[in-house]
Image (cartoon, rainbow, N blue to C red):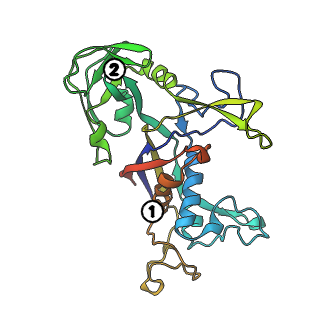
Amino acid sequence: MYTLQRYILMALDPVHIGTGGYRLGRVDLSIVREPGTNLPKIPGTSLAGAARSYAAMRYEKQRCAGQGQNELSKNGHCGLPTCPICYTFGSIKGTEGGNSGRVNIADAQLLLFPVHSLAGPVWVSTVDRVKEAGFTVTAPNMERGEFATTLPGWDKPINLGWLLLKLNQGEISIAPPISLQAWDALSERLVLVDDSLFSQIVNSNLEVRTSVSIDPLTGAAKEGALFTYEAIPRATWLWSDVVEDDYSSGEKPWPVSKKFNGKKDKAGELLGETWKKPLDVVKSGLTLAEYLGIGGMGTRGFGRLKVVGDWEVSHG
């Protein structure tokens, strides 16, 4: 029994998911990219780690966050089949082994990328990318160097960073499968381009910041400690799939009896909120990313990510 749930996410802050080291190039600290397209992404491991940690906070099961591999610590995973965190994301309990989780969280891929232009801010994507995310799209066939747009009354070329593109005046419409938060604010500021240009546009318009370490003795900038890092910019839209693979048979372990008032597991531990399926737990964790963020540079105003909509794609 599986359910495929799709989430649409919007970056409220720049998001930096680093590759784990310095490199020679345009920036010192680069972000994770798809090898084939060179497009930035948010790895599913980053989403899953944040979702587990934040869900553990919401369900008041903090001991079940993280890896839980210290068998001598009271903060390790409880491993109970009635625990929403351990049941959803899996558990490890010392030498006793562990249990696999019931959800698979995919990488978050770029959907709509914000770029400054002569028309002001626009959100750029491609026909195939928007269709793959489940949107209904009507657009003309475009050659490399052309664009189509929902900008009302726009009838001239447009610049996207350093690129100047020619308008294709064919009819265009883009509609999400469900109502999405903030969609009305950008539905008339969308630009579609050829797939061959999208990577160039994105990588030319990533946010790049320069920082320097402070010498604690002098309070001034530390010599030789200047570094740069890049991030997915604020207002970027992404999409990610979450598959609930609930392979357990028989009576479900979550509390459904009035005896537990919907708030305690069968071990009597207080839960912060109720749940009926693993997808409820995932969503409760991802919702907190709107306030607590994911990825690096969180103390520098990076990382907040908001769920603007989700829907069931298929089940079986």
Give the residue type at disc 1: Asp
**Does residue 100 appear in this view?**
no
Q: Position of residue 97 (x, y in %)?
A: 72, 64
Which residue is rendered at x = 52% and y = 61% of the image? Answer: 247
Residue 133: quarter of image: top left
Residue named by callout 1: 280
Which residue is rendered at x = 52% and y = 49% of the image? Answer: 105
In the rendered view of the protein, which quadrant contains the C terminus? bottom left
Q: Which mark is residue 300?
A: none
**Does residue 212 appear in this view?**
yes
- In the image, 171: left or right of 258? left
- In the image, 86: left or right of 258? right
Residue 2: quarter of image: bottom left
- Quick one: 61 or 288, which is closer to the camera? 288
Element type at marker 1? helix
Q: Position of residue 34 (x, y in %)?
A: 56, 31
Q: Residues within 10 Å of mark 2 (few under 14, many from 20)?
A: few
- Quick one: 198 or 222, which is closer to the camera? 222
Residue named by callout 2: 118
Q: Dots 1 and 2: beta carbons under 8 Å?
A: no
Q: How many marks?
A: 2
In this view, the mark in front (1 or 2): 2
Give the residue type at disc 2: Leu
- In the image, 230: left or right of 116? right
In the rendered view of the protein, which quadrant contains the N terminus? bottom left
- Quick one: 226 or 179, which is closer to the camera? 226
Give the Cα separation between the discs numbered 1 and 2.
Answer: 43 Å
